[in-house]
Amino acid sequence: MYNSSVENPLSIVIPVHNEERIIVPNTVRLLSFLRQRSVLFEILLVDNGSTDKTYSLSRSLEDTNPEVRSLRIDERGAGLAFKEAVLNAKYEHLICLDMDLPHDFSFVEEASRLLEEAVIVIGSKRTGAERRGFFRKIAGSFYIFLAKSLLRLPFTDYSIGAKAYKRSFVLRHLDIIDRHTHYVFALCLKAISEHEKIIEIPVFCEDRRESHFNLLHEGFYRIFMLLRAYVRSKMREEKEKAHPA
């Protein structure tokens, strides 16, 4: 059972790109949920290269809701949006959500509590429950298989939504945040290398729309970045063998 009380101030991070259809109703829905909790919070809506009315709607939400902050970068990129949010966030506990809000809100409460003892909290739809398209499930399963086989990572979800971080940890490693979505995986690797704690918890996820990403391009990109991380890890191992401390 998830803890029903949230006490730690929260920075809710949501990258947005061409979300004019859902940004207002979903932000209002999230505000309603958070206002019912005893928590100080902000919602960072980070527009990255939208070509529709997303940013103007985001500004309107900021004007009418003191908890909402509207940020904007000209280039498209979920990683770039995440970095902008980290640099501008007020609070130590960062909770990352997708604008279509496919995950149950209980993740917000549980992740905030667990960030007291961990630097990263992973919300995993694979250990929880999911209603998602067949291709997304297959592609995700293959990526997780590679991560476990090559780098022996035990986690089961590296998507950008339903993830939580200590801001101080991320600030130390801004240089490894790429412009796209590999940064979740990279931050997990960094946490492990520094013997920091990562906790994975189950979440429910339901796809409410088609992905904004080119799934084929995204799949090749993430696998390429994973393989690059594997090669670099093997090179470090060989170097340590050749020059033991």
Image (cartoon, helix red, strand yellow):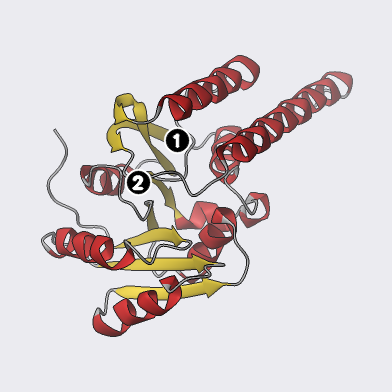
Q: Position of residue 193 (x, y in %)?
A: 61, 34
Which quadrant of the structure image shows residue 120?
top left
Query: Which residue lies at the image location 25% right of the left edge and 78% below the top edge?
Result: 65
- Which badge, 1 or 2, comes first in the chain's sequence? 2
The numbered dot on residue 197 is 1
Determine whether the residue tagged by mark 2 lies in a helix, strand or loop.
loop
Q: Position of residue 38 (x, y in %)?
A: 13, 62
Judged left or right of residue 80, residue 160 is left
| Residue that sits furthest to the bottom in the current view | 63
* C-beta proximity under 8 Å, tags 1 and 2: no
- The amino acid sitting under disc 2 is Leu
* Quadrant into which the N terminus falls: top left
Determine whether the residue tagged by mark 1 lies in a helix, strand or loop.
loop
Q: Which residue is mark 2?
A: 115
Q: Position of residue 46 (x, y in %)?
A: 46, 67
Which quadrant of the structure image shows residue 9?
bottom left
- Residue 197 in the image: above or below residue 58: above
The residue closer to the viewer here, 40 or 99, is 99
- The amino acid sitting under disc 1 is Lys
- Residue 155 in the image: above or below residue 66: above
- Residue 134 in the image: above or below residue 28: above
The residue closer to the viewer here, 164 or 72, is 72
Q: Position of residue 160 (x, y in %)?
A: 47, 45
Query: Which residue lies at the image location 53% right of the left edge and 42% below the top edge?
Result: 184
Local crowd size for mark 1, using a 10 Å CA cut-off: few (<14), some (14–19), many (≥20):
some
Query: Which residue lies at the image location 49% right of the left edge and 35% below the top edge?
Result: 158
Tell me, yes or no, if residue 156 can be seen here: no
Local crowd size for mark 2, using a 10 Å CA cut-off: few (<14), some (14–19), many (≥20):
many
* Distance (Cα) linking label 1 and label 2: 9 Å
